[in-house]
Image (cartoon, helix red, strand yellow):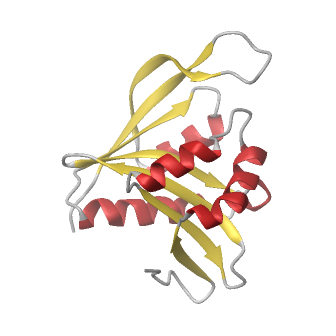
Amino acid sequence: MSAVVDDRRQWVPMTVLHLDAVLAIENEAYPVPWTRGNFIDSIAAGYDAWLLVDARQTLLGYFVAMDGVDEMHLLNLTVAPPLQGRGHAREMLDRLVALCRERHAQMLWLEVRVSNERAKALYARYGFQPIRMRRGYYPLPPGQMGREDAAVMSLKVEWE
């Protein structure tokens, strides 16, 4: 099931066959990336895992989200680093909000590293509100001691 976004991009459900390309982006984008196992577990659990690809089937980005009761939780949203700043993250958030509406989810939640200023700014521009901090939520890169805090943010999903 792929839904055409426009004549140049489309949505493709993520499968284990896509994981080499997904992991290449994940490893380039983050100092502590998700593992193959994280993605496999998410797909096996039936989470919403979608790829945004262009007309040549080049992977632009992806997201993974988990349904809840009247809410959805964004677990991972990543744009290929060389393609950032071109509106792909906003397009993925639009798709995610559309899924929330389809499923009657009233809230969309996420955690983001406190050091990830670019992502926090994107989410704030989109309308997410900071809710609280989760202390020691994220592991630090290898060789660094301790853990990093996460900013918890939420978006009230408006009904059309």
Task: Give the answer, above or below, for where 88 lies relative to 64.
Answer: below
Task: Give the answer, above or below, for where 158 lies relative to 116.
Answer: below
Task: Give the answer, above or below, for where 142 lies relative to 34.
Answer: above
Residue 100 rendering spot, x and y as whole percentages: 30, 59
Please identify the residue farthest to the top as the structure is shown: 145
Residue 156 rendering spot, x and y as whole percentages: 28, 47
Task: Please state the total of marks drawn on the protein image.
Answer: 0
- Asked where in the image residue 15 lies, by quadrant, the reply is bottom right
Q: Residue at x 58, y 26 (%)?
A: 114
Q: Residue at x 37, y 49 (%)?
A: 66
Whether residue 87 is visible, yes or no, is no
* The C terminus sits in image quarter: bottom left
Please identify the residue farthest to the bottom as the structure is shown: 7
Q: Residue at x 65, y 59 (%)?
A: 19
- Asked where in the image residue 101 lies, by quadrant, the reply is bottom left
- 60 and 48: which one is in front? 48
- 98 and 158: which one is in front? 98
* The N terminus sits in image quarter: bottom left
Residue 57 rendering spot, x and y as whole percentages: 68, 79
* Residue 12 in the figure: left or right of residue 36: left
Whether residue 100 is visible, yes or no, is yes
* Residue 78 in the figure: left or right of residue 123: right
Task: Give the answer, above or below, for where 34 lies relative to 21.
Answer: above
Q: Residue at x 64, y 27 (%)?
A: 115
- Asked where in the image residue 55 lies, by quadrant, the reply is bottom right
Residue 47 rendering spot, x and y as whole percentages: 40, 54
